[in-house]
Amino acid sequence: MNPFTAHPAAVGETYLEHMRFASRFGGRMTVGGLAALAHALFPFLFTTTASRISDELIRMRAASRGRTVRIVDVETNQPLDWQI
């Protein structure tokens, strides 16, 4: 099988669909990682950005597989609604 289409086909996508999803996902990961690094140096910056983006990534993956996901606070089991 063609290495450019084998994995996309295995997850039910065309090459271009997979490229679009992976690019968007990777871009969000990069932004979240940069925010986390900036927060490590300056704790008053980006206080919820990395965790909010992490939650977005979880939702993106679930949606790409046709699942739904609910992000909740582990202590209260209440849904988390992030505000920008």
Image (cartoon, rainbow, N blue to C red):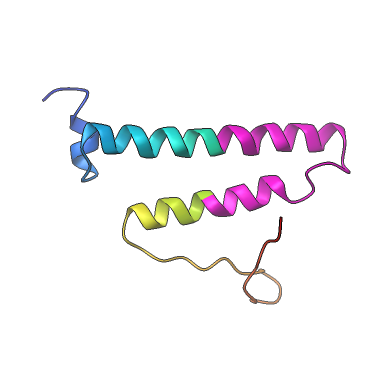
Q: Is 49 inside the magenta-drawn segment?
A: yes
The residue at 57%/65% (across/down) is 71
| Residue 1 vertical placement versus 64 (above, below) | above
Tell me the quarter of the image containing the C terminus.
bottom right
- On the image, the x and y values in percent for residue 57 come to 51, 48
Q: Is residue 20 left or right of residue 78?
A: left
| Residue 65 vertical placement versus 41 (above, below) | below
Residue 18, quarter of picture: top left
Tell me the quarter of the image containing the N terminus.
top left
- On the image, the x and y values in percent for residue 52 come to 64, 52
Q: Is residue 24 left or right of residue 72?
A: left
Residue 21, quarter of picture: top left
The residue at 70%/77% (across/down) is 76
Q: Residue furthest front?
A: 84
- On the image, the x and y values in percent for residue 60 come to 44, 51
The residue at 33%/32% (across/down) is 19
The residue at 62%/73% (across/down) is 79
Q: Residue furthest top?
A: 3
| Residue 32 vertical placement versus 80 (above, below) | above
Q: Is 10 inside the magenta-drawn segment?
A: no
- On the image, the x and y values in percent for residue 38 come to 78, 32
| Number of marks drawn | 0
Q: Is residue 57 left or right of residue 4?
A: right
State which region is magenta.
Answer: 29-56
The overriding secondary structure of the stretch rendered in magenta is helix
